Image: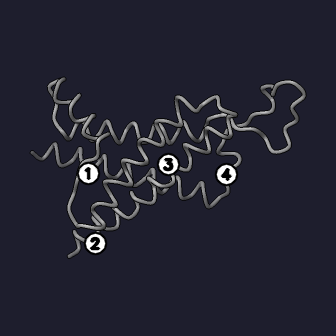
């Protein structure tokens, strides 16, 4: 029972985190005036959609599943001679990297004035615009991802 509650809690957190990644992807695209739409935003939206799919599937059917994005990581991992655990650790690492990128990407300052073009001083790091609640939730979700990666690493080393 304890393991099921623990797993269910992590899946709920992952589902909410996936939704936040999708929102952050759209926000990064809008806040950067389109500069980050092709790089950071696509990654955040893809990762978030996959997280919502995998965790939502578990919450509905109580079965683990692997989304298309994770399957892609696993395919590349097997082609390179590694296993699913290594692919999942890289998946989590990319998740954290996208999260960090979303926190430091440039966003327009409130009240920035545009005569012809925005200038560098019109942009600041996104985390400076976040509310304390948003910062704490981002930190919590990243901590859960780090815990999941640590758990994967420990289970792999015990095998």
* Quadrant in the rendering for residue 119: top right
* Residue pointed to by mark 2: 5
The colour scheme used to paint the residues is one colour
**Distance CA(mark 4)–CA(mark 3):** 14 Å
* Residue pointed to by mark 1: 151
Name which residue lies at 27% across and 34% down: 73
Earlier residue among tags 4 and 1:
4
**65 above or below 118?**
below
**Distance CA(mark 1)–CA(mark 3):** 22 Å
Q: Is residue 20 found left or right of 36 in the rendered image? A: left
| Front residue of this view, candidates 157 and 35 | 35
Residue 53 is tagged as none
Q: Position of residue 138 (x, y in %)?
A: 53, 53
Tell me the mark number nearer the camera, choosing from 4 and 3: 3
| Front residue of this view, candidates 156 and 141 | 141
**Distance CA(mark 4)–CA(mark 1):** 30 Å
* Residue pointed to by mark 4: 130
Earlier residue among tags 2 and 4:
2
Under circle 3, the secondary element is: helix
**Distance CA(mark 2)–CA(mark 1):** 16 Å
**Distance CA(mark 2)–CA(mark 4):** 31 Å
Dot 3 crowding, Cα within 10 Å, few <14, some 14–19, many 20+: many
Q: Is residue 97 found left or right of 107 in the rendered image? A: left
Q: Are marks 4 and 3 in contact (CB under 8 Å)?
A: no
Q: Position of residue 62 (x, y in %)?
A: 22, 67
Tell me the mark number nearer the camera, choosing from 3 and 2: 3
Residue 21 is tagged as 3
């Amino acid at each position: 029972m304890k393991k099921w509650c623990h797993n269910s809690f992590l899946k709920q957190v992952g589902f909410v985190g996936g939704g936040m990644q999708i929102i952050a992807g759209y926000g990064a695209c809008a806040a950067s005036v389109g500069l980050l739409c092709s790089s950071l935003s696509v990654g955040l939206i893809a990762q978030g959609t996959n997280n919502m799919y995998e965790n939502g599937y578990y919450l509905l059917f109580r079965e683990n599943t692997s989304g298309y994005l994770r399957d892609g990581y696993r395919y590349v991992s097997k082609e390179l001679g590694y296993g699913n655990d290594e692919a999942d650790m890289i998946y989590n690492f990319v998740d954290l990297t996208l999260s960090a990128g979303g926190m430091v990407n440039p966003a327009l300052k409130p009240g920035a004035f545009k005569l012809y073009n925005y200038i560098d001083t019109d942009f600041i790091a996104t985390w400076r615009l976040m509310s304390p609640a948003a910062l704490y939730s981002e930190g919590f979700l990243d901590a859960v991802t780090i815990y999941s990666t640590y758990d994967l690493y420990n289970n792999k080393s015990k095998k």
